[in-house]
Image (spheres, rainbow, N blue to C red):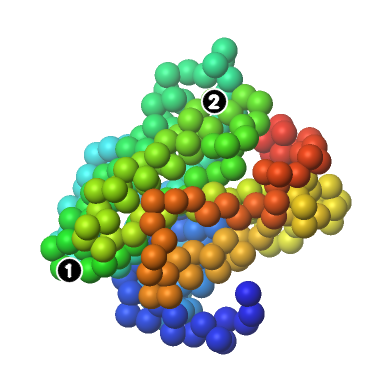
Amino acid sequence: MGGEGNMEKLLDGKTILITGATHGIGYVTAKLFRDLGANVIGIGRREISISGVKIVKVDLTKRSEVLNFIEWYKKEIGIIHVLINNASVNSRYSIFNITLDEWDKMIELELTSPMLLSKMASEIMIQKGIKGKIINISAIQSKSPLRESLAYATVKGGLISMSRSLAVDLGKYGIQVITVVPGPIYTKSDEVPEDLDKRAATLLGRMGRPIEVAYLLAFLASDYNTFITGTEIVIDGGRLISRKPDPEEITRGEV
């Protein structure tokens, strides 16, 4: 996309809740949305300061903290135009070595919490007459899993099904529900190692950047998006149809 100057007021006046807003795609998206005029509330595991963004520390793997946040949000904020369920952690276990604790943590973080927040958001939207958006962030592992990624691939696939079901239930209220499916996006630092970029298994010959996903999310959250619901949008540089092997760093779960 072009420069942000052309998009300045794209999200003006919208109240947007983003989970996982203190790292990676969520962090970059929160800052971009702020610059585009949105009132951004971010959920994160860390207490960090992002100018112009309200960050609330919540452990989304703990149901009690999620329910407490929902009560706070209803009382203190009380309005929402867009919910982005983005919070995620990698999980590299196979069926042979995964523990129940790891399984439960992934289900709470990436299915139960998005469900509870989607319920809150849809109730507020319907009450306020807002034709809003719920956007769930999956991953291409939902379609093409890496080795030893049982829980991660499972919950990312579950998010796709959750989005479709929500879209069916919420369409009559004008609420759109969309899944974004990122491919290899480099989030470890601002600069992608040149060697890793060159070995990326994408058709475009490089890793993706968080800002590229953030620009897509900005469009989906905006009033320009009026007729997309119940579907998935893949942003992977062509990784899913590439026949190139992934770099070993990705296969091992280090990136």
Q: Residue at x 77, y 57 (%)?
A: 204
Residue furthest top as drawn? 96
Q: Secondary structure at mark 1?
A: loop
In front of the other: 135 or 120 = 135
Residue 185 x/y as whole percent: 65, 52
Q: Is residue 24 above or below residue 227?
A: above
Residue 206 quadrant: bottom right
Residue 122 in view (yes/no):
yes
Quadrant showing the N terminus: bottom right
Q: Nearer the viewer, mark 2 or mark 1?
A: 1
Q: Position of residue 59 (x, y in %)?
A: 37, 44
Q: Which residue is mark 2?
A: 150
Residue 129: which numbered mark, if any? 1
x 32%, y 80%: residue: 13
The circle drawn on residue 7 is none
For label 1, count other residues whose C-alpha is less than 10 Å away and answer few (under 14), some (14-19) or many (20+): few
Q: Give the secondary structure at mark 2.
A: helix
Q: Position of residue 114 (x, y in %)?
A: 34, 45
Q: Amino acid at mark 2?
A: Leu
Q: Which sits in the foreground, 234 or 2?
A: 234
State how far apart marks 2 and 1 are (Cα): 40 Å
Q: Is residue 252 left or right of residue 66?
A: right
